Image (cartoon, rainbow, N blue to C red):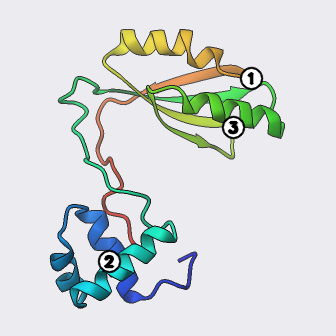
Amino acid sequence: MPDSQLDAIDRKILTALHRDGRMSMTELAGTVGLSKTPCQLRVKRLRGEGYIRGFQAVLDLGKLGLDHIAFVEVRLSDTREAALRAFNAAVSDVSEIEECHMIAGAFDYLLKVRTVDIKAYRAVLGEVISNLPHVANSSTHVSMEAVKDGGQNVAI
């Protein structure tokens, strides 16, 4: 693990909350073998130190009509630091881009784009992604099925 300041109980807390962020403090304390107050103090510390960034509802986006997923390889025309910052800032403003990863390899970025259908995706690609700063070209891979999604089984 990158941070040796975490002990076994901290890791148990993080694992339990990662699986169920709605777990009550009493239930969490019992799960990790602490009383409620020390458990609350540890959770507060873990939040303060940035190990826990927040809590949110995990939505079924397919039920909301957002089940079209495309992965887009993006190559930039300029990869100097200012160009990367401009691209990163612009990507943050595009709601259809669910994830953006800088890649070491044959292309510069991999985007996960979620839309209602292929027609909506085509519009986002042509009108938004292609017009992001320094985009030279892109290549799309459409997801046929999500076999594993959401990172819920991460080892902590």
Residue designated by label 3: 106
Choose the circle earlier in sequence order: 2 or 1.
2
At label 1, which amino acid type do we have? His
Residue 64 x/y as whole percent: 21, 27
| Residue position marked by numbered label 1 in the rendering | 134
Dot in front, 1 or 3: 1
Give the Cα distance between marks 2 and 1. 42 Å
Seen in the picture, residue 79 relative to 121 is either above or below; the reply is below
Marks 3, 2: nearer the viewer: 2
Name the residue tied to disc 2. 13
Residue at the (17%, 85%) spot, across then down: 30
Q: Earlier in the sequence, mark 1 or mark 3?
A: 3
Mark 1: few/some/many CA within 10 Å (<14, 14-19, 20+): some
- On residue 124, which mark appears? none
Camera-side residue of 38 and 80: 38
Residue under the image location 28 percent in, 27 percent down = 67
Alpha-carbon span between mark 1 and mark 3: 16 Å
Depth order, front residue of 31/44:
44
Q: Amino acid at mark 2?
A: Ile
Between disc 2 and disc 1, the foreground one is 2
Residue 59: quarter of image: top left
Which residue is drawn at the image coordinates 31% and 48% (left, top)? 148
Q: Position of residue 95 (x, y in %)?
A: 45, 27
* Left or right position of 28 against 41: left
Looking at the rendered structure, the secondary structure element under dot 1 is loop
Task: Give the vertical position of 4 relative to 64 (above or below).
Answer: below
Residues 53 and 38: in front is: 38
Query: In the rendered structure, which amino acid carries the disc numbered 3?
Result: Ala
- Specify few, some or many for label 2: CA neighbours under 10 Å numbering under 14, 14-19, or 20 or more: many
